[in-house]
Amino acid sequence: MDTRRYRLLVTILCHLLACLFAAAPAHAAPGPGAPTHISAELVAGPVRDGQATLAIRMTPQPGWHGYWLNPGDAGLGMQLAWDVPPGVSVGTPRYPVPRTLVVQGLMNHVYEREYAVLVPVTLGKATGRVPVRVKANWLACTEQLCVPERAELATEIVPGAQHDARFDSWTQALPAPLDAPATFTLDARALRIAVPLPASVPLQGPHLFVQQDKLVDYAAAQTFSRKGDTLLISIPRARFAGQDAQAVQAVLRLDAAGNGIAFSARPGAVPTGGVPVAGTGAAQTDGSALPALPWLLLAALAGGLLLNIMPCVFPILSLKALSLARAGESQRHARVEGLAYAAGVIVACLALGAILLVLRAGGEQVGWAFQLQEPAVVVALFALAVAITANLVGLFEFAVPGFASSGSPQGAFATGLLAAFVATPCTGPFMASAMGAALLLPVAPALALFATLGLGIALPFLAVAFIPALRARLPRPGKWMETFRHIMAVPMGLTAAALGWLVWRVGGTGSLAYVLALAVLLLALLALAGRAQRRGKPALVPALAVVAVLALGVLTMPKPAPQTQAESSILNAVPFSAQALADARAGGKPVFVWMTADWCLTCKVNENVAIEREDTRAAFAKAGVVVLRGDWTRRDPEITRYLTQQGAAGVPLYMWYGRDGQPQQLPQVLTPALLAQKAGA
């Protein structure tokens, strides 16, 4: 069951529970002393100037939680029915700052420890002891089940009674009221709020709890930035948002300790820009807090240019090197091939970017290089790498892109498509900010970033194609090209082996056995095609058989095996989850979040060079560092959501949370001593 259906089902069940609460007969309530998973107590505070305060003290059992007045995507807020003497009026309950709890992709606003809901009472003309009774209904939940509970609570408000010291701590847990009005704008895309908050007020993992139901997407990334003494907040709208609001009531959590403020916002102007707040997905949804578009385009161009030296791209680029060397005989031919190759790269980057934006607009939690999280795509790339390797060693002379006997624009274009498709997972270390921005910008500038990435990848070949002096430095065509072609079979074969390993990691042992059998059959058919070619006979039948086998192999591949447990690590890493991160930060120890994927070469290099090291383990053990490892090899919505919150489009991502809880994003290329130095700081 996908997340959207699960969310809908939970919402329906919660509303049914609410109906059951309302319709339940009186004898359904548990009697005094009946066991509950969240015990409730009604406590009366002292009387001052005809005003009193009641506290409903709630104590969850370990592993259970209750809900804020707006429970989030699932759950149910507490319902109260008061019985007080005539002339006595009960005010609006005030709740402490809740915590966030993500279960199956659903955001819940909960209390997992003892908390108290404070209720103001106006006594009017009542004198003496004032009896108060309340029928309370609430939902007690774990991460697996929920139980509706109820109780009838009673107490007396006694003038002159001794002060109950517990009210001091309960009052301190309430969000402080903001003494200045906030403003908001609301459209079909997002709720944007400007909160007057002094720049000196520290923010550590802030979160905004909106009181109105179904106004915003509770599980979406919230973005925060500061502009002087104004805090700017942006939250995407809910998929099925209700009517536009005339006012917004909200509670802003300031830090992991539960400090917060409560405020009401009215419609009004909300500034743009601002300085992003670290570790909060720090960019406005409308792109206003992002760097200027020209700088992002420059970063994308530089990232694509540097991508040409990445080892994961080298086998594909070697194919184009042969084509350019061959094209050196004709200036026109070289330029046509250069333009065709550039067009293929740019079209591939645009297509991948457009698909990514469409999937995210439809609610899918995907990121850059998402194609390598799909087993069918990896199998297709594996089969293609096997075929190109067979071509390079001379098994057959089928027209593989870029290797037709005389170069063609079509072959150069296809080589560009292939180069960009395989190269995109390696963009992370060079252009993480640009790719992260592309997921937040409007469609047109986002696509411009993807196109500029493609231009950067193709730029060296365009330079060789259009600058005769560079092209003149290429070796003259000759017999050496055949030898070079055979040599290039080695890196391409290693690429095929790496893709086979990735098939195993993504799909399991059954998928690996399947693709190995597919590779044997594919090589046999290619050998038949090559034999026919050497005899001067047409190879159309074997060629069509190759295409049919490849298509059938991708369409009929077995279902991937269930996700296995994370790889062992000398750092004793714990699998990442939002709850695990919240628990680790609440423990007051340093936290290292490590996001990786098996198809990410930079991730593997960092792990060998800086992470999986004995000196790192010793430094972490001495400092008590908690390590959370997120494996993004397969699609994981929770990891994707966290990446988006940090402004990252993909992996690697490394986050450091100090003892004070302040987040810091580490470089994507780690030095050997960096982590040990962070632990010892």
Image: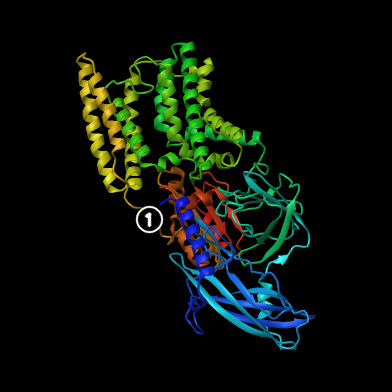
Q: Is residue 292 left or right of residue 532?
A: right
Q: Quadrant of the C terminus?
A: bottom right
- Residue 141 location (% of width, % of height): 48, 68
Residue in the image at 52% along x and 56% along y: 675
- Tell me: residue 350, above or below residue 471: below
Q: Who is closer to the viewer here, 489 or 219? A: 219
Q: Who is closer to the viewer here, 152 or 429? A: 152
Let me know if residue 577 appears in the view. Answer: no
- Residue 183 location (% of width, % of height): 74, 52
Q: Who is closer to the viewer here, 262 or 304? A: 262
Residue in the image at 35% along x and 18% along y: 404
For the residue marked with disc 1, what is the amino acid? Glu
Query: Which residue lies under the disc numbered 1?
Result: 567
- Tell me: residue 51, above or below residue 437: below
Q: How many labels were placed on the picture?
A: 1
- Residue 408 location (% of width, % of height): 41, 16
- Tell me: residue 286, above or below residue 621: above
Residue in the image at 58% along x and 69% along y: 78
Let me know if residue 553 appears in the view. Answer: yes
Q: Is residue 147 left or right of residue 100?
A: left
Dot 1 alpha-carbon crowd within 10 angstroms: few under 14, some 14 to 19, many 20 or more: few
- Residue 403 location (% of width, % of height): 36, 21
- Tell me: residue 504, above or below residue 51: above
Q: Name the quadrant containing residue 56.
A: bottom right
- Of helix, strand and loop, which one carries label 1? loop
Q: Is residue 602 left or right of residue 270?
A: left
Q: Who is closer to the viewer here, 6 or 260? A: 6
Q: Is residue 551 left or right of residue 598?
A: left
User: What coloring was used for the rendering?
Assistant: rainbow
